[in-house]
Image (cartoon, rainbow, N blue to C red):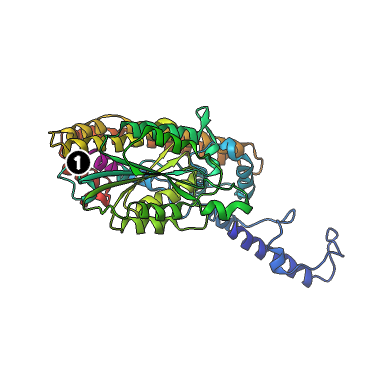
Amino acid sequence: MKAIKVLIAACGLMVVLHGCSSEEPSSTQETNAPVVAPDEQAEKPLQQGQKLSREEQIAALKALLPEGATKIPETAAEIASFPIGRYAGTNFSEHEQELRAFLNDLPAIENPDQEVIDMYYLALLGLFAEDYPDPERLIEDIKMASFGSPDIDDPRFQFKEQYNVEIILDASGSMAGQMDGKTKMDAAKEAIKAFAEALPKDANVALRVYGNKGSGKESDKALSCSSSELVYELQKYDAGKLAASLNQFQPTGWTPIAYSLQEAEKDLSQLAGDKNTNLIFLVSDGIETCGGDPVAAAKQLADSNITPILNVIGFDVDGEGQKQLKAVAEAARGRYVSIRDKKGLQDEFSKAKEIALEWHNWKSKESSKAYSRKVKQLLNNTQYKLEWNFLADDEKRNIDWMIRQIKRDKRFPLQLAEGLGRLQDEHKRNVDKRAEELEDLLDSLTKKSYKETIEAISEQYRTKAGSN
């Protein structure tokens, strides 16, 4: 939009200068129209009949492309690292007003060649490109599945004398949204209760909630942004106490993620990482709304003496939320996963439960060969392939809708919609092909050791996690 305004300002200045140099106004010009300064003209829409040059239209189109996007992604690494779309994880029907405004801002370039059509498609990806699980996420999942293995160099993944899990749960107003016939908050509470019940009796669990006071109103922002409460202190599982803790709050306020991470560090400050396995699960359905810096807070948490493993769970989050939460996980050298239903949340907590059971076996000196079994199960199933396929289907449905709107809009040449349709079909086939290749790679690694597996994935996708 900034680029468009600059171009409009230039065109407006040309119109004003032309009017000043003419001896007589044309028959269509208003003789009593006020003189408009160039900076004021920049804020006004194009006058009827006023037209940008082709070069100016292309510049305006480039301004709408996602930052850093220069080509349509082809390889698995390119697809996974492509900027997450503004409306990723949602349906076009939720944003029709904003999308129609985007179409109005989209320049209508006549006789577009393939390079220009590619740029239009990149602009659509900037709206709906999904967050495909990347090789880094796969490696982190394998590390979680291999927890306790002596092959892992990262000391955070070694068993220690005590096992502690703290869940930081979003209680902001958006958690009242519906999912599978119930609120996201109710789904989260059920998943937390089931997780805690399944922990070994000598493991510890804590629950912190944020945004649970005040309301979403501006007048309550200060109160809500200062609300981050340890409702269930770190202790062994107690059914009655946990149930009472879960029943005392409902989704209501703002989202102070940074403050909650800082408070979680205090919660575990006496549990040094050299003697404690500390896992933290941050569950959020949106971005920081209280002005804090959750990325800086996550880095501080990672560098603290508790050396936790931070698992960030995006619970039904849009594109902007996914970007921020992913950055939070990366800053803490943790893992990020985007989920869309209660089962996904239960599956994530199950990873911590399985680690706790392995820790219990280790502490009890019981022999366990679960490392290789779990990794083999992880690599053998089609989880990653299906996740790519499902995301590709969602992405295609949303972009197809946009292409239909372009086709109906008489401003755009028909060849644009036809070219975009071909690109969309090619991109969908390519994503599905990469998903098949990923499944084949994982199947080929089921008999390899942990280190061999990580090295193979790192070599295939040139990741930076191969040294872990």
Q: Is residue 194 above or below residue 412?
A: above
Q: Is residue 248 left or right of residue 240?
A: right
Residue sitting farthest toward the top: 181
From the image, tell me which residue sits under label 1.
453
Q: Is residue 227 visible?
A: yes
Q: Is residue 177 or residue 214 the one in the foreground? A: 214
Secondary structure under tag 1 reads helix
- The x and y percentages for residue 430 are 38, 37
Q: How many marks?
A: 1
- The x and y percentages for residue 326 are 40, 49
Residue at image position (32%, 34%) is 350
Residue at image position (53%, 46%) is 120
- The x and y percentages for residue 425 are 45, 34
Q: Residues within 10 Å of mark 1 (few under 14, many from 20)?
A: many
- Part of the protein shown in magenta: 138-147
- The x and y percentages for residue 361 are 18, 35
**Where is the N terminus found, in terms of image quarters?**
bottom right
Among the 4 quarters of the image, the one containing residue 56 = bottom right
Q: Is residue 291 above or below residue 231?
A: below
Q: Is residue 413 left or right of residue 70?
A: right
Q: Is residue 139 magenta?
A: yes
What amino acid type is highlighted by mark number 1?
Answer: Thr
Among the 4 quarters of the image, the one containing residue 137 = top left
Q: Is residue 328 magenta?
A: no
Q: Is residue 373 or residue 65 the one in the foreground? A: 373
Q: Is residue 429 visible?
A: no
Among the 4 quarters of the image, the one containing residue 298 = bottom left
Overall secondary structure of the magenta section: helix
